């Protein structure tokens, strides 16, 4: 990792990245910072999983930590957020901990890239549960970040000691922003509408040590 000049500010320290990547910890911190969250269950108990599905259906499955997986041909891939059929929740659930979440009714997603004190928010329209599964279908619109969400983001960044992060939200039909996750090492350059602005902010941070 590089450090900025003058006050040796990291983008980000590797230990802080590691701590901030753990999804269960993210949800606890997000709740403490005032974000709206979807009902969530982490369990390896099939009975608990089925009861959760019955109460909050439809539900989705999410990995506990982002990681690269290889398919049967050895090709790298990701585990996308996907819907869960309650019939899948058999005794195999007991093999390890799983994260289940109530599927959020949404009209779009929002990605907020944070560089120091600067926030760059973009609406992502796709119609997909997990927009990362098909980038070719996405359209982007730059939007403002609501003051309450911005305040929670700054508190969240401070909690983990982060300088850079990418937040993902579901945008509800009533305009609510539901926290989904925060990637402390998130990608940003694929969004042409904000690529130069984010690059300039990172350059300022590295050159001057502040924004």
Image (spheres, grey):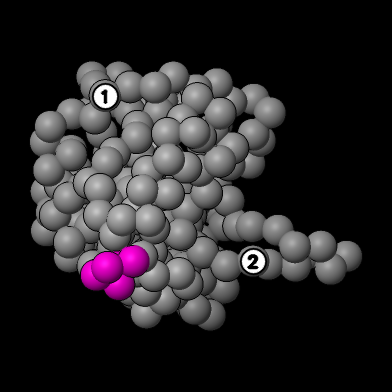
Residue depicted at 36% across the width and 65% down the height: 4
Residue 135 colored magenta?
Answer: no
Q: Residue furthest right?
A: 73
Along the viewing direction, whichever of 38 and 68 lies nearer the viewer: 68
Which residue range is magenta in the image? 5-9
Q: Position of residue 12 (x, y in %)?
A: 37, 67
- Quick one: label 1, few (<14), some, or many (20+) residues within 10 Å? few
Residue 8 colored magenta?
Answer: yes
The residue indicated by pointer 2 is 68
Image check: 8 left or right of 49? left
Q: Is residue 80 above or below residue 127?
A: below
* Tag shown at residue 206: none
Front: mark 2 or 1: 1
Q: Position of residue 160 (x, y in %)?
A: 24, 67
Residue depicted at 29% across the width and 60% down the height: 209
Q: Secondary structure at mark 2?
A: loop
């Amino acid at each position: 990792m590089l450090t900025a000049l003058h006050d040796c500010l990291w983008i980000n320290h590797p230990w802080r990245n590691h701590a901030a990547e753990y999804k269960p910890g993210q949800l606890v911190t997000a709740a403490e910072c005032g974000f709206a969250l979807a009902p969530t269950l982490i369990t390896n108990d099939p009975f608990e999983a089925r009861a959760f599905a019955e109460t909050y259906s439809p539900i989705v499955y999410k990995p506990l930590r982002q990681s690269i997986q290889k398919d049967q041909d050895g090709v790298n891939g990701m585990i996308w957020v996907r819907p869960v059929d309650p019939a899948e929740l058999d005794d195999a659930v007991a093999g390890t901990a799983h994260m289940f979440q109530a599927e959020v009714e949404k009209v779009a997603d929002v990605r907020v890239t944070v560089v120091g004190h600067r926030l760059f928010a973009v609406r992502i329209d796709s119609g997909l549960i997990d927009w990362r599964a098909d980038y070719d279908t996405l359209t982007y619109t730059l939007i403002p970040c609501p003051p309450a969400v911005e305040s929670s983001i700054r508190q969240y960044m401070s909690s983990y000691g982060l300088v850079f992060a990418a937040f993902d939200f579901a945008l509800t039909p009533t305009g609510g922003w539901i926290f989904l996750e925060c990637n402390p090492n998130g990608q940003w350059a694929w969004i042409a509408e904000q690529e130069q602005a984010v690059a300039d902010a990172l350059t300022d941070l590295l050159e001057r040590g502040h924004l």
